[in-house]
Image (cartoon, rainbow, N blue to C red):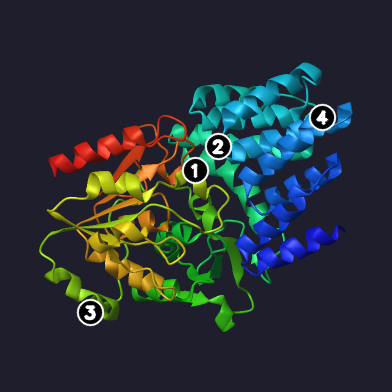
Amino acid sequence: MNPLDIVSKKLYSFNEKQLTYDLLDAFGKNAKTFSQYDDIAKLFFEINNFLKAIEYGEKALKISSNFEEKYTTSKNLITAYNKFNYPEKALTQINKCKKIYPNDFEILLDETVSYSLLGKINKSHKLLFELSKRKDLSEDVKKKVHHNLSGYYFHKDDLYQAFSHYITETEKNAYENIKLPFRRWDGTFKKNQTLVIDANCGAGDEVMHVRFMKNLKEHGMKPIWATTRKNLSEVFNYNNFESVCIWDNPEYPEDSQSVYALALPYFLNMNVKNLGREPYLKPLPEKEIKYSYIKKDEKFKIGIFWNSNSGFEQAHLRSLKFEDYQKILYNDNYSLYSLQMSDNPVPEEYRSSIVEFHSKDREFADTFSIINQMDLIVTSCTSIAHIAASIGKKVCIFVPIMEYYSWTSSTGKSWWYGDNVHLFKQTKIRSWKEPLQKLKEFLSEL
């Protein structure tokens, strides 16, 4: 194995992101051969720095000396362009590659992603259905096509079909390096059966799916929510959703079965009418007392969140700039409260006009109660959006063109929450101008 590969990935695992970038850049600036540029590009891609992956990939392409190098590098660049939200550049390379190999199914699959990112959903879905009819697809491409077709059914409000397409590949990726000690639940309801719900997913996903424990209880099951987030578990327990933190090494009955949390809507055969539109979570009482002082602020209180460094590879698609918020939300009638964490604080020049809660040790339980003190939440589509929606707070959510399924529907609204949720959807790639204008109009009507 390349020593640089070992060192860079180890540094990155220590959360030394900038040091990892600097290390790879140092080698990249001194690169001279195709293989050196190509190696640096691939390493940047693997740690989700797609801008740098593109930079070095383009350098590798320029000095590639044979057909194989050119074609392979072009394919790598297509994926990086899509990941970095430049699908128009991906399509340029795709069209060149299709002239050489019109039946390269990986390229054809990338093409559907590019059109989705551009908001050309119908074209993307049409190409996916055409691909799905091919008899000569590799097993890997076939599974990805099947998975990506979930978007078509989410847009049609057919949750059962959507999840039947979505969950297989999602679950496979979640458990790629994890083996659970229990037999997987096959969806058969059995009275008094202990069902361990494994929450190997994002915090927002946990908040969104914990509601289904109620449905399992109605079928006579004994569900236990198993999470890695200890204080999120505390919130769930307070709301009568039995939960444990796996780091506490909980013990379960020997005949327990397990299920992936995101698979619950599929096994429960949920539809858009029975997902539940009422708030189902409340903050912890002790946290409510801790933040009750905020109520003394008599202005209209707006909690804001604009950018996430969660490590999610598509975080940049759903992130805005604080300056975009500031132009619309700065108003003598409003008090602004930042819900960002310490890795993304308010820019220094604006800190005098906003209250921050970004300490490194802020818990999810704190976030629930801070949000509960607000009159309005304005956020990108992260866990903040799900927390606010689940407790019934009025929340405005900025949604990227390629939206998460919880914000997808035939109506443009979310079926997963009530009328307290207002979606401001991006219509032009890499631009939030129109959604921000709609937020401005929304605020003027409050």
Q: Of circles 3 and 4, which is in front?
A: 4
Q: Kindly identify the amino acid type of the residue bearing the numbered disc 2.
A: Asn
Q: Residue at x 48, y 67 (%)?
A: 221
Residue pointed to by mark 3? 289
Q: Kindly identify the amino acid type of the residue bearing the numbered disc 3.
A: Ile
Q: Earlier in the sequence, mark 3 or mark 2?
A: 2
10 Å neighbourhood of mark 3: few (<14), some, or many (≥20)?
A: few
Q: Of circles 3 and 2, which is in front?
A: 2
Q: Nearer the viewer, residue 128 or 24?
A: 24
Q: Which quadrant holds the C terminus?
A: top left
Residue 195 in the figure: left or right of residue 287:
right
Q: Nearer the viewer, residue 242 or 188?
A: 242
Q: Residue at x 85, y 41 (%)?
A: 33
Q: Of circles 4 and 1, which is in front?
A: 4
Query: Is 228 rendered above or below residue 151?
Result: below
Residues marked 1 and 2 touching at CB (< 8 Å)? yes
